[in-house]
Amino acid sequence: MKPAENPMPQNDKPSLSDVGPLLVVAIVARLRAGGVSVSTSEVLDALSALVHTDLTSRSKMRAALRATLVKDASHDVLFRRSFDAVLPLFRPRPDDAPSASTTTAGRADDEEQLLDSVVRALQADEADDIDHALDEAINRFAGDHDDGRSAGHHAQRVLRRMNVPDLYRRYLEADRDSTEFGRGVGAAEARAAIEQMSRRLTDMLSGRLREGDGVAAQQLEDLQDRPLLRAGADELAAMRTAMRPLARHLASKLGALRRRGGSGVDMRRTIRASMGYGGVPVTPVVRRRRPSKPDLVILCDVSGSTAQFAPFTLTLLHALHEEFRRVRSFVFIDGIVEITELLESSPGVIDAHHLLAKRGLVAKDGRSDYARALTTFLATWGSAVTAKTTVIIAGDARSHDREPATSLIAELRHRARRLYWLNPEPRGEWDTLDSRATEYTAHCTGAFEVSTIRQLTAAVAQIL
Amino acid sequence: MAFFTSVEHARDSLAATGYLVDEELATVVFLGDALGKPLLLEGPAGTGKTELAKAVAAGTGAKLVRLQCYEGLDEARALYEWNYRKQLLRIQSAQATGDEGHAWSDLHDDIFSEEFLLERPLLAAIRHDGPLVLLIDETDKADVEVEGLLLELLSDYQVSIPELGTITAVQRPFVVLTSNATRDLSEALRRRCLHAQVEYPDAARERAIVRSRIPEVSEELAGQIVKATRAMRALDLRKPPSVAETIDWARAVAALGHHELGDTVARQTLGVVLKNDQDKAKVRDQLHLAARPA
């Protein structure tokens, strides 16, 4: 369906009113299939926006629909894909016409031209030109899409055949700089451009792969129930997005719970305050219940097996920092480091590799060692755990056949007000092989299985 | 209201104030005006979201009312408040003059009148007669309750004050909300707005911005500076340079009398763009700007 490919003149109202709704509905259907909720009022907004839009300009139409239908930048990729599918980009290239020759020399020339046009588009930083050039590159270099491989796989193949180092060289060649700094800048710019290109390429390929079937919709639907430890990189990114509103929701719910219930007017302080106004009680003082705000200490295992899970726990708990007097976070493998400052300085962008880059995390061989890590913790930061502290340990409780940390966990429980264990493994796998889950959690106030985001939020809500 | 007649008109009147927008953002601004819907601008700090509202006000000659959101902002600070102290004085003076003839009801009507009302930004925006741009800055910093208040205000453009009745906007203001996405705004608020993701401008536009703000900078120098700041933004710094900092840098280099950005000049003026030691170290390292022994 591409009725507006050759848009009617703007004064031709009847045809606009026919085409507009069809167009918008087709795009909205694709957005909804991808898991973006678009309300009816937004559809109406989109239509009234089109009335005010110059329909001969594809980019203006796209901007109008983007502003009215998509309210979250993380849905941009899906929107672009939907828009392109409903209103495909058509651009005649008269200068490319003779290049249809089939000789090998001609083909080599074509590739030469194609790579040049990619580099030119990247240098000009024109999104549409980049898309167009990449589109051609995909047509030329990507083989058959339907072999069941992931978009990432296809993207790698296209990139290989486009010869990235060569692209890089071409990009740099366009302007040679004499100064050291200029060259450094040029190189950084080229790196960023090529990175951006490969991201866009993957987007476009996954768009082509998913075209038509409901894969995207399914994926978004049960994201909350997807096992964290088995998620792929792009799923993790999507889960991170899914998690933000959850954290916010939880924070406001808890906040409301805490704020509720002042218990009436404090007469003594009201009368004291009224003295300033000659005995007129201008500002009644309300007695406030002081909610107990516990200290929170989080200990997160980030060894190979659980590294993916740690950022989620940390992000969620830090989103709730207002509910605590103080939150201190630590990550450990066989060494242990404090990362409170890192989390505070960059909220919401914690990534597993940020955490793993910390020095001191690996003391010996880089396999998790609860006993060693907890001994170090108690020796160095032991004073952080007091009778007011809630301690949360997140990890798979696997000892790798090392000395168990049971006595240390008992010690922690003894010092802290409460101690909880979050285990990212499904309950069925607890106590299998070298897992000491039950032995450890016997000393805890509570233990939760948190293999999905939904379980994680539920566990945190319960702990608080 | 109708500030603008077309997307081009919107773009040109913003450009006249030195604020250069791309077609997408110009379209959103034009539509916000044409449909009478608030704009929600999201994006990294320093991409000119706040400046956009100011530019719209300056470009159309409208009055700008700004509500800066912060944690703990409440109705009394955002909407209106009664001036207790003044009301109290009024009551006392009525007693002092021994004016027993005045009935309580008169006094009551008197102390809940215009004179004792402290107008806060949102009420000021509603009551202003004439073209107006309402900027609600850093909406994500405010508490969730304020969002509820904004929802009510932005759907009907009216406020109910129990003592005075309902006040409806004389003229729909042009509303701009900005957010740095430190927390997600509610779905309901998003639904009511036109959304735009404001990113750093592309290289050509940023060059044009630098040139239009500081005419004495040569095309070449502007190009070098923009290129360098863009490379810095690609480095995953803690505080990537903002557009304003690009302009500052260009101004600094020009003020020092240099015509191009060489190693030495860049090293000397790095503090203008980067305000964080770790960032500086990273840039020196990654962009080969190490201070070598002479």
Image (tube, rainbow, N blue to C red):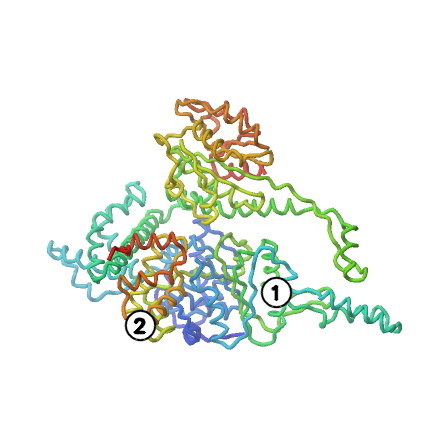
Q: Which residue is the site of mark 1?
A: B156
- The structure residue drawn at horizontal position 39% and vertical position 61%, both measured from the top left corner, is B200
Q: Position of residue A199 (x, y in %)?
A: 32, 51
Residue A134 visible? The answer is no
Give me the chain letter of mark 1: B
Q: What residue occupies the far front of the structure in this picture?
A: B294
Residue type, numbered disc 2: Gly
Label 2 environment density (alpha carbons within 10 Å; few <14, some 14–19, many ≥20): few
SS state under label 2: loop
* Real-space Cα separation, disc 2 to disc 1, in angstroms: 55 Å
Residue A443 placement: quadrant? top right
Nearest-to-viewer mark from 2 and 1? 2
Same chain for the residues under marks 2 and 1 in the image? yes
Q: Position of residue A11 (x, y in %)?
A: 43, 74
Secondary structure under the numbered disc 1 in the rendered image: helix
Side of A271 where A95 appears, left or right: left
